[in-house]
Amino acid sequence: MSTAHDAHADDHGHGHHGSPFIQHHYDDAQHQFDSGKFGIWIFLAQEVLFFSALFVAYILYRVHHGEIYSYAHKWLDVKYGAINTAVLIFSSLTAAWAVRAAQLNQKKLLVGCLATTIACACAFLCIKYIEYSHKYHEQILFGRYFDPCVSPNENPLITKSNDCAGKKTTIKWDYGAGKATEGCFEISALDLDPKEPGVQAECDVEEVHLAADGKTETSKKPITNICADKIGKGEEFEKNKYPCWKPSYQPAVCPDLTDGAKRAAGAAARPQVGILVDYGEGDHEHRGKDIAIKANCKKPAAPVAPDYFTEAQAQKPELGKALVAEHREEHSEHELLYAGPPPEHTNMFFTIYFAMTGLHGIHVLVGVFVFIWLLIRATKGHFTPDYFGPVDYAALYWHIVDLIWIFLFPLLYLIV
Amino acid sequence: MAIEHHDDHGHGLAHVAAPRVLLATGGTLLLLTLVTVVSSKIDFGGSSINLAIAMVIAVTKATLVVLFFMHLRYDRLFHSVVFVSAILAACLFVGFTLMDTGQYQHTNIWNPSAPPMAPIGPRPVNG
């Protein structure tokens, strides 16, 4: 307090010549300070308009596609968002205090406040890095890079078009057709010991045996002869090649095994049985090591994007049990392991998320450099009660960065 | 503190924020952050009500930041005019875009597989 008084007294004595940083084209320190302050407020107004474009994108998309927001925000961790909010608010406090310290010529306090602000900004960026890297690894990204392995509650997601490490399934959901268009299970995923024997498929099946010399032998079999109770393990399975499927779960060719008997003949065939999750009407192929199965199936009821699959359905599909739409509530007592596809265009949420938090993060990064510059100047004792403009302007910039985050946090993380 | 505050109005380049005000602002902001997180867990009877509550809290927090951390309460009126103008412009930006976006819901987007009908009348002659 006495320091403050001394500083003021000092200031009065020397006028604007007290600080060597008062430029000559200003009348006095006050003039220089006010000019800078006006400039920074114009800049802050620009910042508001700058970010408002992204808020327009956010609001517009939320008005038209609210379901995406209420689904996709669950991928964001409120914990990280709340910690970052607190960190930014605290850094805003230290930035405001830095201005006060500079005004009162409290040099050590000024350096401390600036250093704390920098530390908080770095902490914010570190937490953001944790969030971003998690999303990068889970492919919860913007635009066409949105291809997550897991649903918001960490269940494997039936929408992958790429392989996920450690996951057995690769299933892609076609929103236009309202069905899964691809999906291959490795042979180990097949249930070789079905619990429900009996006729379970409604398909006309044609069997093509593929010999090593490329010759084929075709035999037609009606579906009624193909029963789950014929499927055995190992060698037995090779003899009884037909899994039984309801129309919603038909034998078919894996996407990379589609080019017909030529490629698959003999040794070229992959030692894998593919199962296409296909709700469609018409011909389907199922190809194993030395066999191709063609099935003509009836069109089932209109497909619905399922909310959840059980483990048994998705990973080890039970024969005779259709892969049907089942709601979360109905499944509450079961173990939920495979989630259905997210709403269409969910990637737009993350496009907006990354655009907004990314631009905000760039502002934080810029703030770090500005405050490091201020810290260096503060240690050199540049800032005095008649020259503290840079601290004040940078603090104002920092507050607007905080202000934007104050809106981003509830809008992105706290959606109900 | 009071002395400082009084002192400042007479001299110095700008208002010096009182520690009490800074701490109270920071504390309230942190408290409101907690409140907004907790309120997001409670269903107030509709997501729009929750959104409104979250936005009221956010606007309150933003106002506190602007008034006390950014000193706008003690600053020149003209700086408030500049800042509020920018916010109003942003509101206009949002408002007009929202008004406009409903206008194109029935616009036919060109689809090569289902082209629109040819216009009635003679075909234009080339050359």
Image: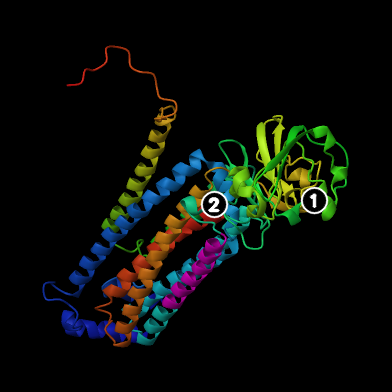
Q: How far across and how far down the image is residue A139, in percent?
A: 54, 58
A163 vs A382: above or below: above
Identify the colour scheme used: rainbow
User: Amino acid type of disc 2?
Assistant: Ala
Of residue B117 and residue A133, the one placed in the foreground of this image is B117
Q: How far across and how far down the image is residue A374, in percent?
A: 32, 78
Chain to which the residue tagged by mark 1 belongs: A
User: Which image quarter holds the N terminus of chain A?
Assistant: bottom left
Quarter of the image where one finds residue A282: top right
Chain to which the residue tagged by mark 2 belongs: B
Q: Which mark is residue A238?
A: 1
Q: Report crowding for label 2: few under 14, some 14 to 19, many 20 or more residues within 10 A (C-alpha).
A: many
Magenta highlight range:
A117-138
Per the image, label 2 sits on a secondary structure element best described as helix
Of residue A83 and residue A36, the one placed in the foreground of this image is A83
Q: How far across and how far down the image is residue A63, in percent?
A: 49, 40
Residue depicted at x 43% and y 69%: A92
Q: How far across and how far down the image is residue A82, in percent?
A: 55, 64
Identify the residue position indicated by label 2 in the image: B54
Of residue A357 and residue B98, the one placed in the foreground of this image is A357
Q: CA distance from mark 1 to mark 2?
A: 61 Å
Quarter of the image where one finds residue A121: bottom left
Residue depicted at x 35% and y 73%: B16
Q: Report crowding for label 1: few under 14, some 14 to 19, many 20 or more residues within 10 A (C-alpha).
A: some
A398 vs B105: above or below: below
Q: Nearer the viewer, mark 1 or mark 2?
A: 1
Per the image, label 1 sits on a secondary structure element best described as helix
Main SS of the magenta segment? helix
View extreme (top): residue: B121
Q: Which mark is residue A408?
A: none
